[in-house]
Image: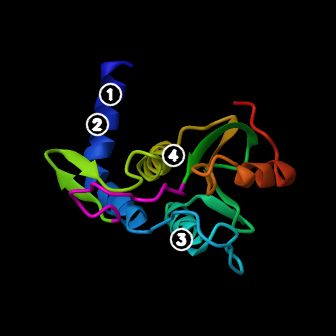
Amino acid sequence: MDQALNQKIDAFIAANKEQILQDIAALVAINSVEGEPAEGAPYGVGPRAALDKTLELAAGMGFATRNYDNYVGTADLNDKETALHILCHLDVVPAGEGWDVPPFACTLRDGRLYGRGVTDDKGPAVASIYAMKDLLDSGRPLRRRVRIIFGLAEEGGVWTDMDYYRRHEELPVF
């Protein structure tokens, strides 16, 4: 990357750092371990709550969002022909033992974030939303649509959320 682009990215991150951290913390606070299916929550109430919060965040930034019957959600940068999908998931594995910080709280220690889902995959989901926001705010015209897909069934290894998505939606070029 050229130096000017690096500086622009650094400036965007600096300007949004606190809100990014708050948004990651809000998602980490949701225990989105797959649970018993419930009415309107095929993967349990935790994953459903994480999806609702994520779609609320994306909609608040100006993206068109869609909830596919609480199996999966999307956020679109624009309404062009689809080319690029970014796949994220909001479910997490059980916290287990050995934590020295609360697993469902976002803890900043020595310049690092800790909490269930910070790196897999709630933090990257929030980073993807903010990257799209930076692109949206740039006003740069795009020929193709960029879409983030928010899955809820990656950690169990069965990917029924993506099966549902494929039955109801187009597949990406990239």
Q: Quadrant of the N terminus?
A: top left
Task: Judge whether 149 appears above or below 58 on screen.
Answer: above
Which residue in the structure is indicated by mark 3? 46
Which residue in the structure is indicated by mark 2? 10
Q: Earlier in the sequence, mark 3 or mark 2?
A: 2
Amino acid type, mark 1? Asn
Q: Earlier in the sequence, mark 4 or mark 3?
A: 3
Q: Which of these two is toward me, 18 or 24?
A: 24
Write down the quadrant of residue 43 in the picture: bottom right
Instruction: Write the start and end of the magenta stretch as one range.
Output: 90-104
Q: Which of these two is toward me, 120 or 83?
A: 120
Which residue in the structure is indicated by mark 4? 132
Contact between labelled residues 1 and 2, with CB atoms less than 8 Å apart: yes
Main structural element of the magenta stretch: helix, strand or loop? loop
Amino acid type, mark 4? Met
Which residue in the structure is indicated by mark 1? 6
Residue 100 is one of the magenta-drawn residues: yes
